[in-house]
Amino acid sequence: MIWREVKGLFWVLVAVLAFHSFIAKPFYIPSESMMPNLLTGDRLVVTKYPYGWSYVSPTIPNPAAILRNVLLGHSEPWTITLPFTKGRIMGGLPERGDVVIVTPPGGNQDYIKRVIGLPGDTIEVRSGRLIINGTPVKAASRPPAMIPVDANAPCGINQFWDRKVSTANGSFCRLPVVHETLPNGVGYDTIDDGNSQGDDYAEVRIPPGHVFLMGDNRDHSADSRFGLEDMGLGGPVPIENIGGRAEFITFSLDGTTVLTNPASWFTAFRDGRAGTSLRPGKD
């Protein structure tokens, strides 16, 4: 009887891992690099099949890492990444503007960024202005984003140079927004938080089989503009390193959840974020 239960649990685990590997998996936003569109604490659904499957697709648990995370409070990837293997099964390129998860070359953690450039494109950033194939991307200032301040979005001096404002409705992080429109018509909001190291990036041509990725929070994102030694992506990324496409937000937590306090499991939910689509629209 016990053996039958163990076998049943085993096949359930196999089914869950297969679903995570080939169909879809949940993803947790750990940083502010995709603000204002994604906040720390957002939970997403990422589909695995839109671009085919590669060496980063399989979800393989790492029991040792799981134990360290649970027992010692570590924050390390709980899965094992296979060695780099060139090519994708039923592969396809993402579209400009897609939000994707990516594994940095030689790494085993997942980042989430936006696809800016495709193979053959030239990419340059000059004084914070994105330039694709020699033409500046259309950019227009929009009203500031007013992000409610909470434990997962503290708006501290280290993140946003103390842009916190107090209103009758509470405290907010008031962030300057620039709306970009890519050559294919896809539009999205970015945050322009002032001068930063990533505001100037010399022109590069994206090699075949690679894409160029950037975070929407342009002054607080380690992406293709930065080297691997700076926690970036080291330039254009091989298409094999793309793990899937972000589809929508399932729910979002403000960082006040306490495992021993069940009431906090409900009060920590942020209003209005569940069900938000992450598929970019055209302007």
Image (cartoon, rainbow, N blue to C red):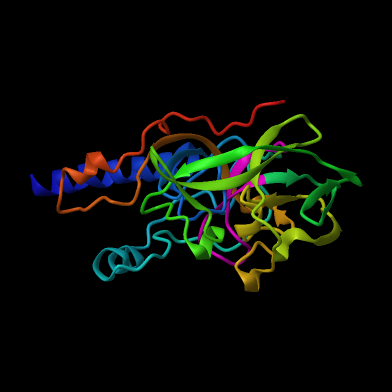
Image x and y of residue 138, in percent: 81, 37
Image x and y of residue 23, in percent: 48, 36
Side of 89 where 120 appears, left or right: right
Q: Which of 106 and 225 is in front in this view?
A: 225
- What's the magenta bit mostly, secondary-structure-wise? loop
- In the displayed structure, 247 sits above or below 78; it is above
Side of 187 where 58 appears, left or right: left
**Residue at 8% over, 44% down:** 1
Whether 82 is among the magenta residues is no
Q: In which quarter of the image is residue 66?
A: bottom left
Residue 90 in view: no
Side of 54 where 97 appears, left or right: right
- In the displayed structure, 134 sits above or below 226; it is above
**Residue at 47% over, 60% down:** 156
- Residue numbers of the magenta segment: 95-114
**Residue at 70% over, 33% down:** 187
Q: Which of 88 and 142 is in front in this view?
A: 142
**Residue at 59% over, 44% down:** 100
Q: In which quarter of the image is residue 266?
A: top left
Q: Quadrant of residue 114?
A: top right
- In the displayed structure, 96 sits above or below 171; it is above
Residue ranking furthest to the bottom: 229
Q: Which of 183 and 189 is in front in this view?
A: 189
Residue 3 in view: yes
Image x and y of residue 74, in percent: 34, 68
